[in-house]
Amino acid sequence: MENDDYTPEQVQAMQQDMWASMNVNELADLTHALNRSVGWWNEYDEMPEKYRKHFIAGKLALVHSEVSEGLEGFRKGLMDDHLPHRPMVEVEMADAIIRILDLAGAMDLDLGGAIAEKLYYNTQRPDHKLENREKDGGKSL
Ligand SMILES: [Mg+2]
């Protein structure tokens, strides 16, 4: 079957379905490949090795900016301006995760493994148990 048997909307829907079924590490590799393909890593590739840590630090800081944008959207009850059918907080949270996935792909991190391990670890933490959180000095947030 040729690609022109499908409408652009059908191709987009199939692509999004495929991406939605990927695991975290596959999404990290995809995200990084997509970002690399449009030049978001060109400066990194061209800079001396000794400066690359600062580039990575800047990329990590940009995760903050997406979370802050999400907070503003949530605080003001805004819809997103790029995807106006979605709440801004939802899209900015996606942007934050996309930035994290991009970095995980660039740094060849096992983000999926770390998430699974940390989720399990958190279930075992005494300071995360409800009875301990409700005590004086317990974590309320
Ligand atoms: Mg954003």
Image (tube, grey):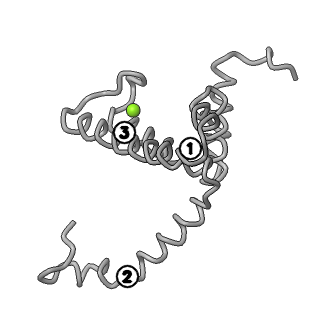
Left of 103 or right of it: where is 123?
A: left
Nearer the camera: disc 2 or disc 3:
3
- Provide residue 109's location: percent of width, then percent of height: 61, 58
Residue 134 or residue 49, whichever sits in front: 49
Where disc 1 sits, the SS reads helix
Q: Amino acid at mark 2?
A: Arg
State which quadrant residue 68 falls in. Answer: top left
Q: Is residue 86 above or below residue 23?
A: above
Q: Residue at x 55, y 45 (%)?
A: 52
Q: Is residue 99 above or below residue 111?
A: above
Asked if disc 1 is less than 8 Å from ligand 1, the answer is: no
Asked if disc 3 is less than 8 Å from ligand 1, the answer is: yes
Q: Amino acid at mark 1?
A: Asp
Of labels 1 and 3, earlier in sequence is 3
Nearer the camera: disc 2 or disc 1:
1
What number is the disc on residue 130?
A: none
The residue at which mark 1 appears reads as 102
Where disc 3 sits, the SS reads helix
- Provide residue 59's location: percent of width, then percent of height: 46, 42
Q: Residue at x 53, y 72 (%)?
A: 117
The residue at which mark 3 appears reads as 66
Q: Residue at x 44, y 38 (%)?
A: 95
The residue at which mark 2 appears reads as 125
**Label 3 neighbour load within 10 Å: few <14, some 14-19, many 20+:** many
Of labels 2 and 1, earlier in sequence is 1
Of labels 2 and 3, earlier in sequence is 3
Q: Is residue 84 above or below residue 51?
A: above
Dividing the image into 4 quarters, which one contains the N terminus?
top right
The answer for how far apart the CA atoms under marks 1 and 3 are is: 14 Å
Q: Amino acid at mark 3?
A: Glu
